[in-house]
Structure formats: structure tokens, C-alpha cells
Amino acid sequence: MKALVYHGPGQRSWDDVPDPTIEAPTDIVVRIDASTICGTDLHILKGDVPAVQPGTILGHEAVGTVVEKGAGVTTLELGDRVLVSCITSCGRCRFCKERRYGLCTGGGGWIFGHLIDGLQAEYARVPFADTSVYKIPDKLSDEEVLFLADILPTAFEVGVLNGRVEPGDTVAIVGAGPIGLAVVLTSRLFTPAHIVAIDVDEGRLERARELGADVTIDNSANTALAEVMELTGGLGADVAVEAVGLPETFELCTELVRPGGRVANVGVHGHSATLHLETLWIRDLTITTGLVDTFTTPRLLSLIAEGRLDARPFATHHFTLGETMAAYDTFADAAHSHALKVVLTAEPVQVAPVREEAVAGVV
Ligand SMILES: NC(=O)c1ccc[n+]([C@@H]2O[C@H](COP(=O)([O-])OP(=O)(O)OC[C@H]3O[C@@H](n4cnc5c(N)ncnc54)[C@H](O)[C@@H]3O)[C@@H](O)[C@H]2O)c1
Ligand SMILES: [Zn+2]
Ligand SMILES: [Zn+2]
């Protein structure tokens, strides 16, 4: 089969590789029908994730069809369409029993395109299939559910739920990339009074407005703090979500929130950020961090199935799997291509026009 293979920092290619096979009775093999690229894949290609060995197939988000199953798989049949998520669950360890699958110590967690071969490929082996994949209702297209594999549960769990967004809150989201925009979309489920999106890219702020931010702030001149204080009568936001991953944006989040406020960090930080306890100690802040667990994936899937949540506006570019190399170039050059998420499909698809209400996201 063909797959996108990481060959060390800065090096990737679309290679002929052996077809995956069943290695454990709890495995399935899926044919990949749709996949996508994550900002984390770009981090890997920069050499920021040394655990990824050269020769690994990248990708941790896909929709596929079961084509082989191990003798121990009991809840899936050949031909089932499934969401293969960025997080795998052994279903047996202490953390999986607490639904904290991201912390799985039994061989799961984030393994695709990291510790084992990933999902930007024609086929993939999926370990712990019964406890890790989600069957997709027939009425939903691949593209409607694809972003449940990572950005939607990440934004909802690590941003909105960790930040304990409540009705009437002012939520400030620093960073309006795919993750920050998914925080905009999913925070609406709790009816905040204000959703404030903060970025330095006007195109992304425009997207934030389309997805439901009522206030957008261009932080190119570092005016975000003053503007949020003006909006909130000098008090600060109830919740700040860090969705960039830089020391200065983390520090900004701790300054943006009111006394007693919550800072939910989602960004992956490559450098240490200063926690200014000399000013923060008296402000009763709660600061959370986290890797996604995906325990909300079934709930988000039913919201999509019932037409209450629509993530299709994230799909800005379409390619076939065979064009994955070009798709990486487009995704990595978001400043010019304005890419949010690229959709890679097994066959060229006729893209249905986005429903009118989809622009509004939560309907
Ligand atoms: N915790 C998790 O489980 C998890 C999972 C996936 C991604 N992430 C991380 O979340 C972060 C966001 O991911 P993404 O894919 O949306 O990334 P992205 O790079 O597409 O988006 C980041 C956005 O931040 C903006 N930005 C940069 N500097 C800024 C500044 N000073 N002020 C305001 N905005 C600024 C950029 O213009 C960009 O739009 C990344 O660090 C990513 O690695 C975390
Ligand atoms: Zn990811
Ligand atoms: Zn586990």
C-alpha cells in the first residue's frame, strides 16, 4: 500500500510500504476512507517529538471501513464504518476505567503516527478496536465526523470543560487556529455572554466571527489585555483558553481573567513559560492543562447526528490520499493558503455544498 512516511526531521515521502496485518486478537485493519493532517504532524516534522522514529507512518485522525478483524474483536463487523480517533484505549488500565484514555498505561493513549504507524495511509492497523473506535451512523458523511478524531474533543475537553464555561460567561480564546476555532464552536454549547477570539491573523478572526465569536481582537500590537478589560468593565474574562502554545500567550491568559477566573491551557509548549505567582497568588485563579481523553466523543457525535453541531466549515481544502504530499504543503502554508483542515480521501469526492446553517456552526 501507499502511506506518508516520516524519515527524520524535515523529511517525508509518499512511499510503498507493506500492508498492515492483524498482530493481536484485539486488532482490526481498516481501509482509510478519509484522513487529515494536524498541527502536531508539523511539530513532528520539525523534530519536536523525538519519540517518533524515522520510518513511522504519520497521521492520527481518520474515518475507515473494517476490512479485517482479530479473533477477539466482538463488537465490530467487516464493512462497519468507524471513526479512528487520535486516542486509543486499552479499556482495562486504571486511567481507561476513569475515562482518562489519554493517560492510558496499557498500550493505548496517543499512539497513531507517534509510537505506531498512523492513519495517513491506504490501510491501518487499529489496536484495542472494541474500546477505541466509534461506529458512524449511516446518515453521516465521512467529512461530517472526521474532525471528531481530534480537534473537536480536544477543544471541548481541554478548553471548554476544563475551563468550566458557564452560561453568561465571557470566554477569551487566545489563538484562532483549528483548535481555538473549535473552542469558539463548542463553547457555544454553554451559551456564554461573550466569545472573544484573539489572534494576529485577520483571516482567522474572520473565521472566528463566522463560527460564533461576537468579539474579535487583532493582537498584533499587543492590545488584547486592554480591550478585554474594556469589554468587561475592568474585571477580566471569566475563562481564558490558551490555544497557541507560546510563553507570551500563556502569560496573557493569566492576565486576561478576572479574580477567581479559570485559565485552560490547550497549547503545546516547546519552551518554559513564567507563572507570575508574585501577582497571581492573591487572584484565586485555576489553571488547567491536559491532553485530550476523547471521553466526550460519543456526546459530540450525537450532537452532530442530531444537527446541533456542524464541523464541516473546518474543511477548507480537499485532496485524494495520493496527493498527501501536496496537502502537507498547503496545510503548512496556512498564512497564504488560509487552510484550516485539509481532507484527504481515498477517492476523489464530490463535495456537497456546506448547508447554510453550517456557517453558524452550532445550530
Ligand atoms: N492539548 C492537546 O491535547 C492538544 C491537541 C492538539 C493541538 N494542541 C495544540 O494547540 C495549539 C493550537 O493548535 P492549532 O492547530 O490551532 O495551531 P495553529 O498554529 O494553527 O494556531 C495557532 C494560532 O495562534 C495565533 N497566534 C500566534 N501568535 C499569537 C499571539 N501572540 N497572539 C494571538 N494569537 C497568536 C496564530 O496566528 C494561529 O492562528 C498548538 O500549540 C497545538 O500543538 C494541543
Ligand atoms: Zn492532532
Ligand atoms: Zn488503558
Image: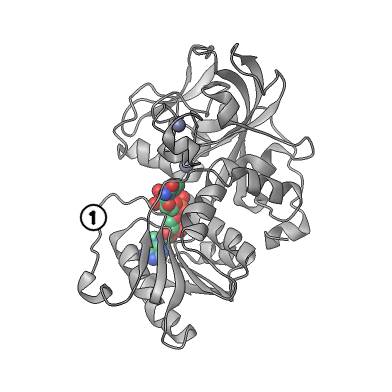
Residue 142 visible at all: yes
So how many labels did they put on this image?
A: 1
Q: Mark 1 points at which residue?
A: 272
Specify the farthest residue to the left: 278
Residue 178 visible at all: no
Specify the farthest residue to the bottom: 233
Quarter of the image where one finds residue 147: top right
Q: Which is nearer the eye, 264 or 324?
A: 264
Residue 168 on image: x %, y %: 58, 76
Residue 323 on image: x %, y %: 56, 31
Q: Which is nearer the eye, 242 or 333?
A: 242
Question: Colour scheme in the image?
Answer: one colour
Residue 121 on image: x %, y %: 54, 24
Query: Residue type at mark 1?
Result: Ser
Against 68, is 215 above or below?
Answer: below
Pointer 1: residues within 10 angstroms few (<14), some, or many (20+)?
A: few
| Quarter of the image that includes the N terminus | top right
Residue 103 on image: x %, y %: 41, 39
Against 284, is 270 above or below?
Answer: above
Element type at marker 1? Answer: loop
Residue at 64 percent of width and 48 percent of height:
299
**The quarter of the picture showing ligand 1:** bottom left
* Apparent side of residue 94 relative to residue 25 in the rendered image (left or right): left
Residue at 33 percent of width and 63 percent of height:
250
Q: Which is nearer the eye, 221 or 209?
A: 209
| Quarter of the image that includes the C terminus | bottom right
